[in-house]
Image (cartoon, rainbow, N blue to C red):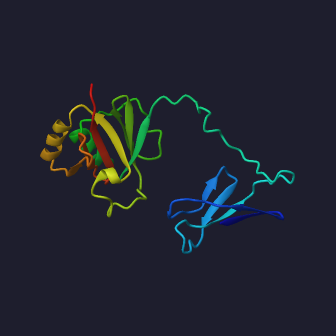
Amino acid sequence: MASLHIASATVALQHKVNRVTTKPIPVNSLCHFYQTNGGGDRSPRFCFKTKAKLSAEANIFERESTSVHEKIDYGVVSVHHVGVLCENLERSLEFYQGILGLEINEARPHDKLPYRGAWLWVGSEMIHLMELPNPDPLIGRPEHGGRDRHTCIAIKDVSKLKVILDKADIPYTLSRSGRPAIFTRDPDANALEFTQVDG
């Protein structure tokens, strides 16, 4: 049981949540949850701090929210590109072009950005290689790329890609679910999934 203090009013709130490790989370730009000592029970307690206004007449909160029944539509079309950080552009191009066979989109502006990079076609979408410092650790990442942040590329034949990776001596893992998919990493440890699709 947690208490919400606003002005002189106190509203009791009970939260039933899974036990997780959490950091302060902004909610509708009005409030923050802070996990405190969970005590002996199975659900953690939260101290709930908010700037929400309390109606003196009805003791209710004014909140800005979107109904779950309302459709959010602003014209999503597709994923345009995925940004991938690399330490050395030439080394990355040897992998993405030389081994995976992706082609550069020459129409994209390479010289207008304050860092080196390349845009590679993946069907009608792209991967944007960016030669920038990587804030992520390169060691200690999961062996199986499916348990890490990854980019998934749809392909027609996983068995052919397996032969290509074996020939280049590039390690990979297969999908743990048994579906036709391969997980591997580029030279900068960015995880890639290749999943087989029909058509």
Find residue 16 and report its image quarter. bottom right
- Seen from the viewer's position, the closer of residues 38 and 65 is 38
Residue 3 makes an appearance in the image: yes
In the rendered view, tell whether residue 91 sits above or below residue 40: above
Residue 122: image location, x then y, percent: 33, 33
Residue 169: image location, x then y, percent: 15, 50
| Residue at position x 31%, y 54% in the image | 189
Residue 137: image location, x then y, percent: 37, 62
Relative to 160, is 65 on the left or the right? right
- Seen from the viewer's position, the closer of residues 17 and 85 is 17
Residue 18: image location, x then y, percent: 51, 60
| Residue at position x 12%, y 45% in the image | 167
Residue 110 makes an appearance in the image: no
The N terminus sits in image quarter? bottom right
Q: Residue furthest front?
A: 41
| Residue at position x 30%, y 51% in the image | 145
Find residue 140 and report its image quarter. bottom left
Relative to 198, is 20 on the left or the right? right
Find residue 120 and report its image quarter. top left
Task: Report the label total.
Answer: 0
Relative to 37, is 192 on the left or the right? left
| Residue at position x 28%, y 49% in the image | 186
In the rendered view, tell whether residue 173 sits above or below residue 6: above
The C terminus sits in image quarter? top left
Q: Residue furthest top?
A: 199
